[in-house]
Amino acid sequence: MSTGYLWHEVFGWHDTGTGTLFPADPAAGHQPISHHVAHPDTKRRMHELICVSGLIDHLTRITGREATREEITRVHTPAHVDRIAAESAQPKGGDAGDGISPFGKGAYRIAALGAGSAIAMTEAVVRGEIDNGYALVNPAGHHALPETGLGFCIFNNVAIAAKHAQAVLGIERLAIVDWDVHHGNGAQAIFAGDPSVLTVSLHQDRCFPPNSGLVEERGTGAGEGYNVNIPMPVGCGDGAYQYAAETVIGPALDAFRPELILVASGFDPNAMDPLARQLVTTRGFTTLTRTVMDAAERHSQGRLVLTQEGGYSPVYVPFCGLATIETLAGVHVLDDAILPVVGGMGGHDLEPHQQALVDRVATHIGDIGSPASA
Ligand code: 9RB
Ligand code: ZN
């Protein structure tokens, strides 16, 4: 088993400014702060735990590159790419598109490196140089739409990697599983009418973007049935997440039989996250990782690529990332030092209302057909 791993120091230099979640504005009561909620130190700390724990010695380092304009415009409009490039050249940078996603000078190249790193990891997996891989990229991508960035995202890294896999790497049918606690609205929109890409998003009900990610959003036209939303109620712990993995994610992948599985891996379902209300621990992320690994074993020769999305607890994200990558690599180097706290708090047993939501989504799995070419 060989697991690829990618981090670049410049991801830690993505400048999210001195706002909190909103830009500083004394008239509105918004004080400046040293760390914006999406400050990259959380991801840098994850990388450093991977190094200090010794997990890095079990991984194959993959080198990223900047995605080209051609690769980015497989997903984004030229106008969006041009605007990001122009604002990135300004002395004080700009914003991804919604006024709460600031970036500093030079962010275009950081964001292009994030997208290109997702591509590089996907290439290494599809070409068989590694079995699976984790691209710890920053900024995140899964909210970005063709014409704009959104929710701290500039370019949709996982969608750009998916388009590249189809355009260049000979992959016809692939799945994108998004376990970030916020809705994977970007991939849903980009692939809505496309039956060759199954999109599955496991998220907290109406968390972000507002009113996005409902069960009824199931794709359009030829793509109808190929988008699956699992909008979990607030307060789901490891039991509810395990039930969703077993009851929807695994069976949906079995119905679709992808040639490649990409994961938009956010650690913000964790119990310490400030931007969501779920209770997941490293046990839950291990279960999710095993679920997609087992499906990849059954359908895609084990080909599996995880790319980093959100996660805003500087304390717990590093352990969640460590456990996820340990699972990918089939090794254990360090226990979760926070688990005695978050795992001992209760809330991890599956509740009837959580089961009811998952069961309702599961009734749609029969609509996922595997294209005739399978
Ligand atoms: C709303 C605002 C947000 C923005 C981003 C996130 C998380 C993103 C992420 C959560 C809440 C503001 C709805 C500001 O981690 N994705 O994976 N809230 N944004 N004003 N309003 C009205
Ligand atoms: Zn998120």
Image (cartoon, rainbow, N blue to C red):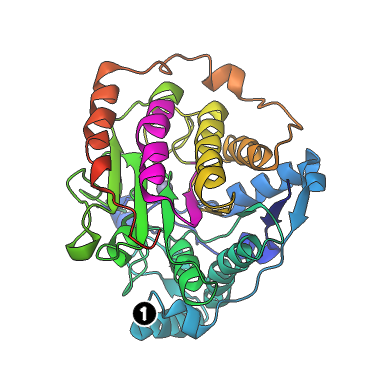
Q: What stretch is highlighted in magenta?
A: 241-267
Quarter of the image with the C terminus is: bottom left
Secondary structure under the numbered disc 1 in the rendered image: helix
List x then y, in percent, for residue 4. 69, 55
Q: In which quarter of the image is residue 12?
A: bottom right
Query: Which residue lies at the image location 59% right of the left edge and 47% below the top edge?
Result: 42
Query: Which residue lies at the image location 35% right of the left edge and 63% below the top edge?
Result: 196
* In magenta segment, residue 42: no
Quarter of the image with the N terminus is: top right
Would the CB of label 1 be found within 8 Å of ligand 1? Answer: no
Left or right, 26 with reference to 35: left
Query: Which residue lies at the image location 30% right of the left edge and 58% below the top edge?
Result: 188
Left or right, 251 with reference to 67: left
Foreground of the two, 116 or 364: 364
* In magenta segment, residue 262: yes
Foreground of the two, 263 or 323: 263
Name the residue carrying label 1.
80
Query: Which residue lies at the image location 37% right of the left edge and 50% below the top edge?
Result: 256
Q: Is residue 181 visible?
A: no
Q: For the residue marked with disc 1, what is the amino acid?
A: His
Q: Is residue 295 visible?
A: yes
List x then y, in percent, for residue 38. 49, 52
